[in-house]
Amino acid sequence: MPPPEPTPLSRPPAAAVSASLETLEAVYAAWTERRTARDAQLAQAASERARLEVEGRFLVGAARAAGSAPSTPAAGQPAGAALVPAESFESLVREAEARVAATLSAFEQAHAEALAAADAACAELAEAAVVRVRRYALAAPLPVQLWLRPVGRDRAVVHLARPSPDGAVLLFFLLTGSIPSRHGFLSDESTEDLALGPPPLYPDEGLSPADLRPDAEALSVRLATGGPVLPVRGFIPLWLAGGPGGPGLFRFLQRGPVLELEQLQEGAFQGVLPLAQAERVAGLLLRLRVEGRLQLEISSG
């Protein structure tokens, strides 16, 4: 039961990869590839660990069984006479246990080192993505079109022209200070369950499959934790005064050719907003225009 050799990384260092990439899509593609490789590495390690544990239990069990198995006496020796002292079998069990423990320890050390290298590569490419997004967002104003559609006297629906994939990433950064974990996050409609539709979160940044479909309040808590990367799918969040988890959380949700503004109210996102709340969001976008971050056009009707 020799300890397994760690699988060498066949990819170039993340720093060299990120330095050779300039477009947002290319940096994100390299980052996604590294994350996929890390996930495959974890799955392979889990399978190998299970194999070693089964093999180890078998080896130790065989050593214990050897001590309790009936012996075959040599010629001229009475039946039932012990050919091997019991202490020898106890030593055999201890040797088997030590061998199994050493093999598992070597495996865990090799796996920990490989995982640390994979995590470092992912972190380097995440930082490269943050740097690229910040550079692009500050280089030139992002064109944005907003429509205010009144509903009665004091309510409204707010739509935003759907941006390109790059534009969505840049707008995400301008409104949150963070970047999405995936380049095509806004238009991604893939789902593991057709009856439920796409989940609002990706299994990135430490999230498990069980974390991907939180209710509105739990989603607001997850978004409130912030961080440089948010694993959001299908919408762009933004916060206004009111505090995390409260009425200050809004999102631009993908609705075909437009993004529709929604506000978290009483545990659910609502698309028909009080006019005052729509004005607050429009005011934030106007501020970004004054700061030279956006080229904003506002229309009504």
Image (tube, rainbow, N blue to C red):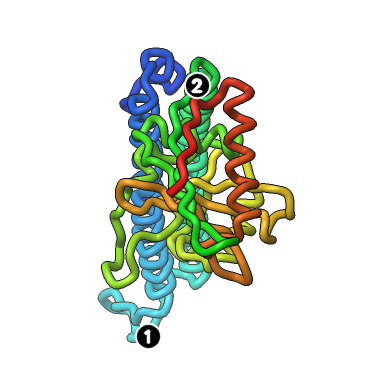
**Which residue position holds label 2?**
141
| Secondary structure of residue under mark 1 | loop
Per the image, the residue denoted by label 1 is 80
Q: In the image, residue 155 lies at what x, y percent?
A: 56, 61
Q: Amino acid at mark 1?
A: Gly
Can residue 103 be seen from the camera position used here?
A: no
Q: Which residue is farthest bottom?
A: 79
Q: Taking the image as drawn, is residue 61 in sight?
A: yes
Q: Earlier in the sequence, mark 1 or mark 2?
A: 1
x and y percentages locating residue 29 in the rendered image: 33, 31
Please determine whether, in this image, residue 139 is positioned above or below residue 46. above
Outermost residue to the front = 153
Q: Residue 198 falls in which quadrant of the image? A: bottom left
Pick the front one: 220 or 87: 220
Q: Which mark is residue 3?
A: none
Tell me what residue is drawn at x 37 percent, y 41 percent: 162
Q: Position of residue 233 (x, y in %)?
A: 42, 50
Separation of marks 1 and 2 at Cα, in angstroms: 92 Å
- Amino acid type of the residue that numbered disc 2 sits on in the rendered structure: Pro
- The crowding category of the residue bearing disc 1, from other C-alpha atoms within 10 Å (few below 14, some 14 to 19, many at least 20), is few
